[in-house]
Amino acid sequence: MKILAGIYEQVLKRNPGEPEFHQAVKEVLESLEPVAEKHSEYAKAGIFDRIVEPERQIIFRVPWVDDSGTVQVNRGFRVQFNSAIGPYKGGLRFHPSVNLGIIKFLGFEQVFKNSLTTLPMGGGKGGSDFDPKGKSDMEIMRFCQSFITELIRHIGPDTDVPAGDIGVGGREIGYMFGMYKKLRNEFTGVLTGKGIPYGGSLVRVQATGYGLCYFVEEALKAKGLSFEGKQVVISGSGNVAIYAAEKAQQLGARVVALNDSNGYIYDENGINLDTIKLIKEVQRGRISDYIKHHPHAKYTVGSRGIWTIPCDIALPCATQNELNGEDAEILIKNGCIAVGEGANMPSTPQAIELFNKNKVIFAPGKAANAGGVATSGLEMSQNSLRLSWTFEEVDEKLREIMKSIYRNTSQAAAEYGDPDNLVLGANIAGFKKVAAAMYAQGVV
């Protein structure tokens, strides 16, 4: 970084102890250096300085009572990062690892991801260090109601529209929406990821996983390749991983491995998704339960080892920095031709560098996993119009959005001299729309 080096140094100074945020900002600013050279007006207007600083950071106490009658206290967050092109939009994450730095990293990435969808949505993110695992439905309900009671001050259908993320699914969204409706006495599209009976969108559960495969499919097509006959390894076993596996299978691939935080399963015959859905969506069990249903499959303790399984396509769909340089070397050695990020920033900078150096197709998360927020945007549209689209209608709109994201990403990469670098393309394509809006609106 030359022109933008000082901005990154300022980010480090202002945001100590936030490595995930630092990593995300560095990657974007490195990509934007040629844009800064070409558009001096953006530097003069302070666009680069402003785009790395959240518009608003909210931290609040979340007290709730567990089933034993003991008062518990968690911390809640909402970072409203950028509203230049629309109301803040981004998920809520409930996980013990959540802190301000992680929420800022996610919110920063969301700005560019939402821009890439072509829909009018700004970027934000939120959550809590609350851990839903092991909690009863009543405990989760009480926590969600306390959380939204504070968050209600800062959100609205035309201000900030949260959705789900890790630890926040349909159950949690339902509890929060119910309390929001009670307190505000209004029925609006303030949350997305809602249940179908009360304003949710079909395809929302499948959207991130489906969208990931649609994007990777376009990247493969550009090289004369496809999913057909390919062996696929997917990390994770939540919605993103499950429905990425489903769509990959529909496109002719054989998915052989999934994992969770405890370990991974390998089924050389191909993962049986009906079993996975039973374990994870109905029973809320662990991935190790798979071998009870399919004794021929293998379960290995320790989730990282999943990348040692030979594959043509790897789809990291679990969490940030789960795939490092050593993992990348193994994947490359085993003949992997494409990596698509279903999670947010799951590949370390070292891994990305190796993929690009070895001509592995690399689909970055802010482009490849934008299907979830794109369908959330479609849910917002349906709520505003007071109507519902069919599964096929939403799926087709999602597919066209992902095709558009790939097209804009690859065109931006080519325009700036590195046509195979989709990280560069995604950062630049996402930035240009937001930057133009910020420039037009003056210094605010």
Image: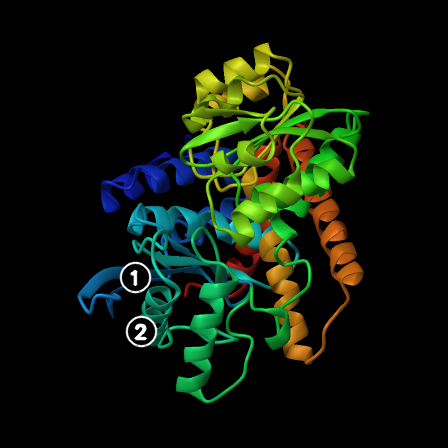
Q: Is residue 72 left or right of residue 80?
A: left
Is there CB contact under 8 Å for labels 1 and 2? yes
Amino acid at circle 2: Glu
**x, y percent for residue 314:** 60, 27
Q: Is residue 38 visible?
A: no
The Cα atoms of the two marked residues, 1 and 2, are separated by 9 Å
Q: Is residue 9 left or right of residue 303?
A: left
Instruction: Report crowding for label 2: few under 14, some 14 to 19, many 20 or more residues within 10 A (C-alpha).
Output: some
Q: Which mark is residue 76?
A: 1
Identify the element where label 2 is drawn.
helix
| Above/below status of 2 relative to 149 | above
Q: Quadrant of residue 23?
A: top left
Amino acid at circle 1: Gly
Q: Is residue 14 visible?
A: yes
| Above/below status of 137 relative to 409 | below
Residue reaching furthest to the left? 70
Q: Earlier in the sequence, mark 1 or mark 2?
A: 1
Identify the element where label 1 is drawn.
strand
What residue is at 21 percent from the left and 66 percent from the top?
A: 68
What residue is at 60 percent from the left and 53 percent from the top?
A: 372
**x, y percent for residue 291:** 54, 31
- Which quadrant of the rendered structure holds the C terminus? bottom left
What residue is at 72 percent from the left and 73 percent from the top?
A: 388
Q: Quadrant of residue 375?
A: bottom right
